Image (cartoon, helix red, strand yellow):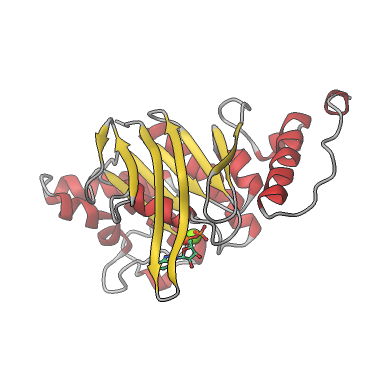
């Protein structure tokens, strides 16, 4: 199950001692159900703020956020979240950590909760580690467990705020593959915040480039590379052109001078 996410003219400012800090400026976005949207943009532009608004942890000053057409008025059980630092509870085993959202949502028996958690841990290659404590796992394995926990209750919406940012490059690429597999099996509408353009091209259906603060959706780039992408696909001319396009757009967002785009024939040769 998944639902569409929409933002309609969302504007928000934080109140700080120095006065209001405008963070989002008339932001409108549409994310179809089951889609995977990546958001990239300059540091501090308002990306995490966007995730808090979608999760219902905060209300915007103006505008509406909708999940499945319904205005978001507070936190929902049907949203899953994962962050850069997987906050796993050290006094619980990996299995018990993954089961936690099911305990909070309620409705399933202990056996059902265990079966569901085991199923997901097996999907991400953590079978055999169910009884370990978080500190006994590597960073990449902890992030895998954290991903399982974020989707164990079958959320309609999954929000990922730089979940792979702290991992080394090879581990990160393994996790992309895992994420892609999970997405096909579990079906949620996903929003991924990242500063890694290759990650956004590998995983997303579309990548939205945010301007510097206050963030607007400066550009939406459709990542039409088909399903079941491989790492090799990132070196194909089409992906390379998308990466170059995104890189340019980020430089514009950062207010840097940008050389004119390469002529279109160059992509085909
Ligand atoms: P990003 O995730 O794109 O780096 P954030 O959405 O976290 O950016 O923050 C956007 C801006 O708002 C930053 O300048 C940040 O310092 C500021 N900010 C974030 N949260 C708060 C808050 N609770 N109160 C005041 N300012 C905040
Ligand atoms: Mg952030």
Residue 51: % across, % down: 40, 51
Q: Quadrant location of residue 135? A: bottom left
Residue 151: % across, % down: 33, 46
Image point 41% across, 48% down: which residue? Answer: 11
Which sits in the foreground, 49 or 38?
49
In the image, residue 61 sits, relative to residue 93, either above or below, namely: above
Task: Work out which quarter of the rendered image holds the N terminus and state it.
Answer: top left
Q: Quadrant location of residue 66? A: top left
Q: Quadrant location of residue 237? A: top right
* Label tally: 0
Image point 28% across, 30% down: which residue? Answer: 69
Most extreme residue toward the bottom is 17
Which sits in the foreground, 142 or 11?
11
Residue 49: % across, % down: 42, 56
With 196 as the anchor, is 6 left or right in this view? left
Residue 266: % across, % down: 88, 28
In the image, residue 14 sits, relative to residue 189, either above or below, namely: below
Task: Work out which quarter of the rendered image holds the C terminus and state it.
Answer: top right
Image point 76% across, 32% down: which residue? Answer: 236
Q: Is residue 122 visible?
A: yes
Most extreme residue toward the front is 19
With 149 as the anchor, is 102 left or right in this view? left
Which sits in the foreground, 213 or 56?
213
Q: Is residue 127 visible?
A: no
């Amino acid at each position: 199950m998944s639902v569409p996410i929409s933002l309609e003219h969302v504007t928000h400012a934080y109140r700080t001692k120095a006065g209001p800090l405008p963070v989002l400026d008339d932001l409108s976005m549409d994310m179809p159900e089951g889609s995977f949207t990546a958001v990239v943009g300059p540091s501090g532009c308002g990306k995490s703020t966007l995730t808090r608004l979608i999760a219902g942890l905060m209300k915007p000053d103006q505008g509406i956020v909708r999940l499945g057409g319904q205005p978001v008025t507070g936190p929902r059980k049907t949203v899953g979240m994962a962050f850069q630092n997987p906050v796993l509870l050290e006094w619980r085993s990996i299995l018990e950590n993954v089961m936690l959202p099911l305990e909070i949502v309620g409705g399933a028996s202990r056996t059902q909760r265990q079966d569901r958690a085991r199923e997901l841990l097996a999907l991400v290659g953590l079978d055999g580690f169910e009884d370990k404590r978080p500190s006994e796992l590597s960073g990449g394995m902890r992030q895998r467990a954290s991903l399982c926990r974020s989707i164990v209750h079958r959320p309609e919406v999954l929000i990922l705020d730089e979940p792979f940012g702290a991992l080394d490059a090879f581990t990160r690429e393994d996790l992309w593959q895992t994420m892609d597999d999970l997405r096909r099996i579990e079906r949620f509408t996903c929003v991924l915040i990242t500063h890694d353009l290759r990650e956004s091209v590998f995983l997303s259906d579309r990548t939205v480039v945010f301007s510097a603060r206050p963030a607007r959706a400066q550009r939406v780039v459709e990542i039409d590379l088909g399903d079941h992408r491989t790492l090799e696909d990132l070196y194909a001319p089409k992906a390379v052109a998308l990466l170059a396009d995104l890189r340019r757009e980020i430089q514009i967002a950062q207010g840097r001078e940008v050389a004119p785009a390469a002529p279109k024939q160059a992509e085909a040769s």
